């Protein structure tokens, strides 16, 4: 179960109601017209899990994922947060960046005879992904025809990667045209490799579906108030900090940074530059790093706290007295779960007292259902904000220039 | 060697010159008066390396570091970036957060008979660090008297941790009073565990010292122009993004986030909230995540690119043609080092073209000398900016309230 709390006053005016209602209409229209596809992924993607059962995956002990951005961040986020409750999940090795040291380090971890290979690219020709694949083919001496049963391609229908996959008869799964890369975690992109790894993706998809249904049933109005508050204050509170009190939520906040940054950082229909800057930090670590700036620095931030009430881990701080440091004895006999949640609560209180707009998301535990709900929570919030900002939430025209310069520079070098 | 480039126009007015000169005077005075101690660490800390030679550390194959914030971020940053050139460095296990899952996972990695234990806390009673130490004592059945030869305490003279260390005769190293936690990486905090691990800390300290000497000799004026530009534009460009094109620089950017956030996020002498929000991202990965927001979103950011010209790694993209994806063949035969640096250059050009204030730091290679210089580069920049902002760069009053609330809540629970 997820519990949502907001510690700021929502504006209740006829203007705010109109902006909220308009945004809800936009989102409903995106969903009903199927112009935007991610809303239906939790039901559509169940089918991939059935398809996967027809493939003999018994010899695969290791999953090698080649993908970057929307083709890796969501898979990584779920793999990291659900592993404590799925300790037997197969190892996943991620090849994302073009960093030669990381690629070299990861290559030696591959056990070719026990590995399957996922080539994930919506467009099909992502330079990091295709370059890494070529390197793995050479390093592992993969015969693309003889080894085609261990190669999976996830891409758009008709993409260059799809042509490649069909030529060699790889396993192929497609991303719907109306689902962008950063909204694709619940498409084949995330569902196929994670289900193959052993995660219960049915439960995760059901958790996502329940939350989406609840939202469209008008039962998640806290989301509307939060989106409106962010929109209303976007000029002064241009930064949203997601402060998660669990190390294993760090990869989820990286996924959120892409979702939020690429979706909302746009030129709106009036030609204005809009958007909110996303930052992910981890408690209690970043109390010792970022908190001072939040409390005393410019009031240009909102804060979203995330905590996990029950880590299902009963590690206690032993009843040991350290000579000279007896003043820390008050914590003895308490659990680390108690400590980290008390730190979250105390930090939140101090931030609220300093006048920062704050809201909180509490997970009763780490579960597939909760993570599914949390993912669509952030996706719906993004869509609502995009509608309020009057931007195209689903494209990313700003990154094209860099790609053109790269291709020109490299082809001439 | 480090090369610095700025792609923005520095203001040249009599006012800017006065502000720059005043800041340089403040920094010189901090150094000469010894009010601020980090400037002299690169020479003072050489002594720790000699002291360490007198301790028999031959049986230690593993270093367990208990510390958080300034007592871990710098050690982690250096351990991560220098490991590729120091492959035989001893393993370091970090206990930082109060996350029960991470602590449980790390406990089983400790090999008690082969480990030494570093308890690092400037104040001496940091709750995460003392709680973790108690847990390790119980888990590893450490006898604090019999095992005192494998326990190291790094703390302020006279702190509660110092009292504790002397009671059990642990090895003790002190942090100078005039060196704050986030400026302490080149004190015993970083130098002792990293030298014990096998890193060449003499070279690193020398690299830091050379850069500090060069700065005070007036040969690093690019730093003054950069600091002034950040100060002058701080109202509109309230965010500084450090965009590093190397996976292993991620921990260094986390260190920078603390340094920058805690030092500058302050109420100034006129009662105004000032500071710049630091963000660390990694290329090429975050081109697929954060770049869109930089190019088209609000113009509230400056960007600092960091790249490594020569990774000393010749991994090539093989000359393999993927059927249907032949358009990526232009990269075949080139190295990943060429690719990632071309991506950095292309992204930087696209960002500059979109009108974002940009500067660049180029390391010719990963070396102790370069990392030492890079660390003090960021420290000097922080001190200069703190002087311009007229804040106390070296305290962190904003985090006290949260601590008080925590203690009250926990003691009453």
Image: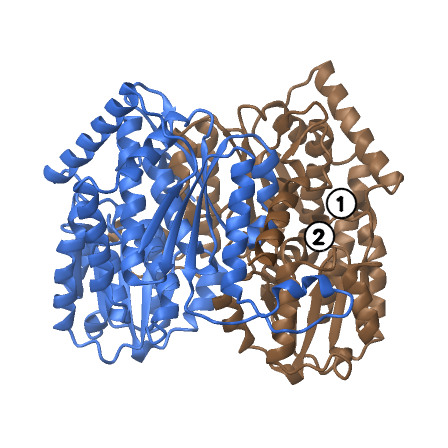
Chain colours: A blue, B brown
Judged left or right of residue A343, residue B324 is left
* Residue A188 location (% of width, % of height): 20, 57
x 50%, y 66%: residue: B100
Judged left or right of residue B119, residue A357 is left
* Residue B150 location (% of width, % of height): 74, 78
* Residue A112 location (% of width, % of height): 33, 76
Lower sequence index among marks 1 and 2:
1
Count residues near mark 2 (Cα–Cα under 10 Å), then give few for <14, some for 14-19, many for 20+: many
Count residues near mark 1 (Cα–Cα under 10 Å), then give few for <14, some for 14-19, many for 20+: many
Query: On the image, which quarter does residue B67 sit in?
Result: bottom right
Query: On the image, which quarter does residue A96 sit in?
Result: bottom left
| Discs 1 and 2 lie in a common subunit | yes
Query: On the image, which quarter does residue A13 sit in?
Result: top left
Spot the residue most to the left.
A33
Which chain's residue wears label 1?
B
**Which residue matches tag 1?**
B211
Judged left or right of residue A188, residue B6 is right
Whether residue B217 is visible to the viewer of this picture, yes or no, is: no
x 80%, y 35%: residue: B27
Do the CB atoms of the residues marked 1 and 2 lie less than 8 Å apart? yes
From the viewer's side, name the closer residue of A337 and B361. A337
From the viewer's side, name the closer residue of B406 and A292. B406
Q: Of helix, strand and loop, which one carries label 1?
A: helix
* Residue A402 location (% of width, % of height): 39, 37
Query: In this rendering, is residue A308 above or below B225?
Result: below
x 55%, y 62%: residue: B98
In which quadrant is the C terminus of chain A drawn? top left
Whether residue B331 is visible to the viewer of this picture, yes or no, is: yes
Residue B372 numbered tag: 2
């Amino acid at each position: 179960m997820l519990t949502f709390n907001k510690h700021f006053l929502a504006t209740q005016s006829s203007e705010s109601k109109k902006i909220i209602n308009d945004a809800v209409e936009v989102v409903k229209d995106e969903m009903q017209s199927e112009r935007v596809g991610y809303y239906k992924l939790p039901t559509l993607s169940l089918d991939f899990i059935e398809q996967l059962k027809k493939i003999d995956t018994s010899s695969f002990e290791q999953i090698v994922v080649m993908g970057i951005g929307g083709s890796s961040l969501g898979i990584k986020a779920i793999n990291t947060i659900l592993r404590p409750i799925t300790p037997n999940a197969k190892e996943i090795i991620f090849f994302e960046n073009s960093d030669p040291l990381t690629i070299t380090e990861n290559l030696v971890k591959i056990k070719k005879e026990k590995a399957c290979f996922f080539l994930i690219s919506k467009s099909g020709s992502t330079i990091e992904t295709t370059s890494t694949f070529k390197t793995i083919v050479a390093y592992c001496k993969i015969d693309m025809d003889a080894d085609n049963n261990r190669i999976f391609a996830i891409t758009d229908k008709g993409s260059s990667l799809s042509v490649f996959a069909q030529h060699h008869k790889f396993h192929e799964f497609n991303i719907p045209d109306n689902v962008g890369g950063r909204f694709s975690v619940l498409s084949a992109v995330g569902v196929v490799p994670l289900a193959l790894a052993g995660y219960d993706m049915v439960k995760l998809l059901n958790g996502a579906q329940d939350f989406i249904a609840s939202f469209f049933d008008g039962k998640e109005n806290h989301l509307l108030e939060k989106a409106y508050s962010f929109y209303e204050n976007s000029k002064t509170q241009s930064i949203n900090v997601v402060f998660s009190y669990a190390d294993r939520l760090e990869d989820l906040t990286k996924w959120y940074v892409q979702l939020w940054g690429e979706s909302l950082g746009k030129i709106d229909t009036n030609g204005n530059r809009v958007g909110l800057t996303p930052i992910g930090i981890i408690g209690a670590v970043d109390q010792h790093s970022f908190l001072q700036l939040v409390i005393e620095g410019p009031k240009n931030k909102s804060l979203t706290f995330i905590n996990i009430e029950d880590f299902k881990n009963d590690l206690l701080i032993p009843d040991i007295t350290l000579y000279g440091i007896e003043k820390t004895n008050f914590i003895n006999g308490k659990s680390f779960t108690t400590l980290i949640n008390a730190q979250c609560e105390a930090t939140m209180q101090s931030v609220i007292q300093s006048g920062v707009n704050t809201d909180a998301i509490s997970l009763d535990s780490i579960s597939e259902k909760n993570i599914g709900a949390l993912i669509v929570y952030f996706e719906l919030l993004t869509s609502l904000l995009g509608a309020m900002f009057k931007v195209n939430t689903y494209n990313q025209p700003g990154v094209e220039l860099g790609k053109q310069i790269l291709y020109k520079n490299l082809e001439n070098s």
